[in-house]
């Protein structure tokens, strides 16, 4: 029995993203098999045949140099999404210190 490839293995072989592989399945250009109703697997022969017939835009990955100010935007996003937890943790820390000092 041949080993079936995972979505990430197919993406690496074709030089595309995993989302592109899932799009090929939705378009019907590639047949995917679900294992356990959840995990997509592919026959290597079908993937190799597809590589010769379909052209893909090259996947270049993440840029090596982030744009200026990207860390500032990432910090702003972090504080936006986790502000409640940060304020709660600070409040609990002050409360614990107060209880220890008072008691």
Image (tube, grey):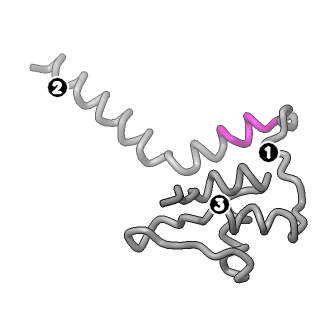
Q: Pointer 3: what residue?
A: 44
Identify the residue at horizontal 73%, vertical 34% (top origin). Answer: 71
Crowd rating for badge 3 (residues with CA inside 10 Å; few <14, some 14–19, many 20+)? some
Q: Is residue 46 magenta?
A: no
Crowd rating for badge 2 (residues with CA inside 10 Å; few <14, some 14–19, many 20+)? few
Crowd rating for badge 1 (residues with CA inside 10 Å; few <14, some 14–19, many 20+)? few
The tag earlier along the polypeptide, 2 or 3, is: 3
In this picture, residue 73 sits left or right of residue 63: left
In this picture, residue 69 sits left or right of residue 46: right
**Which dot marks residue 99?**
2
Q: Is residue 36 above or below residue 101?
A: below
Identify the residue at horizontal 38%, vertical 33% (top origin). Answer: 90
Percent coordinates x, y for residue 41 in the rendering? 54, 64
In this picture, residue 21 sits left or right of residue 70: left
Q: Are marks 3 and 1 in contact (CB under 8 Å)?
A: no
Give the CA separation, mark 3 to mark 1.
24 Å
Q: Quadrant of residue 30?
A: bottom right
Secondary structure of the residue carrying numbered label 1: loop
Percent coordinates x, y for residue 4 in the rendering? 54, 59
Q: Pointer 1: what residue?
A: 61
Percent coordinates x, y for residue 81 in the rendering? 54, 51
Magenta-drawn segment: 69-75
Q: Is residue 82 above or below residue 75?
A: below
Identify the residue at horizontal 59%, vertical 73% (top origin). Answer: 32
The tag earlier along the polypeptide, 3 or 1, is: 3
Q: Is residue 9 above or below residue 27?
A: above
């Amino acid at each position: 029995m041949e080993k079936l490839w995972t979505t990430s293995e197919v993406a690496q072989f074709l030089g595309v993203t995993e989302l592109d592989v899932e799009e090929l399945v939705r378009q019907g250009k590639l047949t995917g098999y679900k294992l356990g109703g959840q995990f997509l697997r592919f026959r290597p022969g079908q993937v190799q045949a597809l590589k010769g017939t379909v052209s893909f835009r090259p996947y270049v990955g993440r840029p090596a140099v982030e744009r200026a100010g990207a860390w500032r935007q990432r910090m702003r996003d972090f504080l936006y999404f986790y502000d409640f937890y940060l304020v709660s943790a600070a409040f609990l820390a002050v409360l614990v210190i107060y209880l220890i000092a008072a008691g």
